[in-house]
Image (cartoon, grey):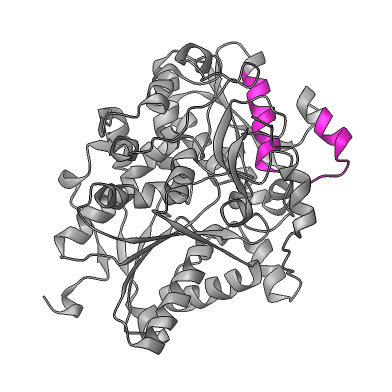
Amino acid sequence: MTEREIPYKIYLEEKDMPKQWYNVRADMENKPAPLLNAETREAMTAKELGVVFCDELVKQELNDTDRYIDIPQEIRDFYKMYRPAPLVRAYCLEEKLQTPAKIYYKFEGNNTSGSHKLNSAIAQAYYAKRQGLKGVTTETGAGQWGTALSMACSYLGLDCKVFMVKCSYEQKPFRREVMRTYGAGVTPSPSMDTEVGKKILAEHPGTKGSLGCAISEAVETALKSEGYRYVLGSVLNQVLLHQSIIGMETKLAMDQYGIKPDMIIGCAGGGSNLGGLISPFMGEKLRGEADYQFVAVEPASCPSLTRGVYAYDFCDTGMVCPMAKMYTLGSGFIPSPNHAGGLRYHGMNPVLSQLYHDGYMEACAVEQTAVFEAAEQFARVEGILPAPESSHAIKVAIDEAMRCKETGEEKTILFGLTGTGYFDMYAYEKFHNGKMEDYIPSDEDLQKGLAGIPKM
């Protein structure tokens, strides 16, 4: 097959859509360390986790052995509203760059929520509904997860309470209003509505918040509200499981045309989209069936993988959640209010942390002005305005394509385009007006958060 016989957009047929999620933990020799009870420092039991999370999601969180887990028919039917998502050959970008590299991206923005987050939101809402709950609580950074969850809850008739990181609440009012359109209650975090919110505001007056703060408030609210459970849009192993639909569709589409990526790139905040995209490819690498280069891209202002430490830490600023062994900057680290709100988390998913620690994956950090330059370059030739989070992956993909131009290497590059940036125009405006600044925390800045990591 010649190059131009590969379509611009490759879609699976509906009948070929995956019927199971792939659990990469089953193929890991070194399993991710268990979640710990913050008080006893013992491994969390299913019963303990069930106080906070839905019962079926607890089972998925703790499942390190089953390679494949069936996707319920009701969830598969919902997926059909926007899946399969297209795998796109970036011919126009390749032409613009004059690179010998072949560039592909999996586009996850073809749904009302505008991002990949809906893949897990509908699954978590479904299990909450099946358990007979009244509603769920959650946090959201950029607003993509909150939007997706409010949409899923509206579809299933569940109440949805969202704590939105304050800087995003102020920067992205339209994202907030989409959540409210779907019936969700949205509170800027940290707030005076919870005890942990009051404590954080007392310690950090005027703070614009972080995902760690918002998680604490959402968990506290769930624990105090009868018939509610807490759900999380990233970081947890169960979320990576649901997001594996991205990578499985991608691999099936590539296999149809005999395409094998050399490098797979994903933006990295808590790890949901990166883990979802790379999971089936990583499984092949773990089983010794194929080799790939995996690259996690994070913001220079919140560099958990590239400058954090691998240790047990609290998953939230208020220290009310279980402890996870992960790459972390410390639960007390509050990043600068950069515009990639979905990547402003102090830690990283335990599965990805273990894989990175074991050398299966590499990471880099990029500054936000360079990210927006790449986003604008991509939008002008590919016709999609990318989310700031996704644009971290675009930046590194373009850099690698340009390196291939210099060396003549015909590398195949795959990256995840996790969502659209149409609710991020405040950020684009600051970039175009020359008012966007880069912030890289000093070692002294990071030490403040790292000093708070509990001694085990």
Quadrant into which the C terminus falls: top right
Decide if residue 186 is in sight here: no
Q: Which quadrant would residue 442 be assigned to in this image?
A: bottom right
- The x, y position of residue 326, in whole percent, is 55, 40
Q: Name the side, left or right, on which 52 lies relative to 319.
A: left
Q: Which quadrant would residue 135 be assigned to in this image?
A: top right
* Residue at 51% from the left image edge and 71% from the top image edge: 395
- The x, y position of residue 124, in whole percent, is 44, 29
Q: Is residue 83 above or below residue 257?
A: above
* Residue at 58% from the left image edge and 69% from the top image edge: 371
Q: Is residue 12 above or below residue 412?
A: above
Quadrant into which the N terminus falls: bottom left
* Residue at 16% from the left image edge and 75% from the top image edge: 5
Q: Name the side, left or right, on which 271 lies relative to 434.
A: left
Please state the extent of the stretch shown in magenta in the rendering.
Answer: 199-222
Q: Is residue 51 above or below residue 111?
A: above
Magenta stretch: includes residue 200: yes
**Who is closer to the viewer here, 175 or 207?**
207
Query: Magenta stretch mostly in which secondary structure?
Result: helix
- The x, y position of residue 417, in whole percent, is 43, 60
